[in-house]
Image: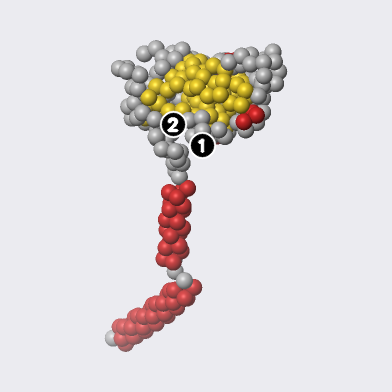
Amino acid sequence: MTSAIFIFLSKIAFTASITIGGGSFANVLNGLGDALPEGSQIQVGSFDGVEPSKSGADFTSVDWQSFNPFLGIGSTNPDEVIGTFSAGEGLESVFQISSELDAELGDLFPSEFPVRLGLRIFDTTANSLEGVAYNTVVRDVSTWIFNDPEVITNQPPTPSIATEDDSLMFWEDNENPFQTSITTTDDSTRIEELEAQLASVIAERDARPTQEDYNALIAERDENLENYTANLAEKDGVITTLSESITEK
């Protein structure tokens, strides 16, 4: 299926304001491959500290984790909400981006330029993204690089994805493109897991023999050794007596 994701930034002569638009004409999916429900959350962000020329094919887990959203719920501009919707048969879970950032109104831009842009898709319609399954996408073309808007000659980036099998497109979970297949653990669940691990370690420690148990074991061993030595001496005495009886006869 041919699909496209278009994000464009209008040409600007005044850097205090910039309009970001675009969207996805391909269905974004959950981990099972089903269309996400209407209102599922989308973020647009940059990869802080990652060289803009670095290929998405070479992204490490650290690179993906550097994703810093500036549009969408949980971003530096959380009022710029982006959600999925149904546009009819075959387009049950698409989304559109239409956001204006104005520095004079307090809107925040990426902290450095140039930066790579990416999209992060979440399997939730809620405002909390903690512990929610997701996936992130980048594309190795110049239009996915956000250059310094202070330089008037810099053209706004126009990142787009024309087809699902685009060889220049890379997902954080590249084995499951367009799917929110990456699962995370929220803090409360992680705390419960750590508490369970700690309880297991304590139980294992308590099950180990104490010094008292060790001393008792050594004492029992020594007693058994003494009994064995005594039995051996008794046996030797019996053998000696029998030998003497045989000799006398």
Foreground pick, 201 / 78: 78
Q: Is residue 195 positioned above or below 242 on the image?
A: above
**Earlier-in-chain disc, 2 versus 1:** 2
At label 2, counting other C-alpha atoms closer than 10 Å, the crowd grade (few under 14, some 14-19, many 20 or more) is many
In the rendered image, which quarter is residue 53 located in?
Answer: top right
Q: Are marks 2 and 1 in contact (CB under 8 Å)?
A: yes
SS label for mark 2: strand
At x 57% / y 34%, what residue is drawn? 76
Give the label on residue 222, or none.
none
Q: Where, quadrant-wise, is the N terminus in this rendering?
A: top left
Q: Which mark is residue 74?
A: 1
Which residue is identified by label 2? 41
- Which percent across, then down, holds residue 232? 38, 78
Taking the image as shown, residue 62 lies to the left or right of residue 227, namely right
User: Marks 2 and 1, Cα distance to the nearest angstrom?
Assistant: 10 Å
- At label 1, which amino acid type do we have? Gly
Identify the residue shown where x is 43% and y is 49%: 189
Is 208 situated left or right of 86 in this image?
right
Residue 236 visible in the current orientation: no
Quarter of the image with the C terminus is bottom left
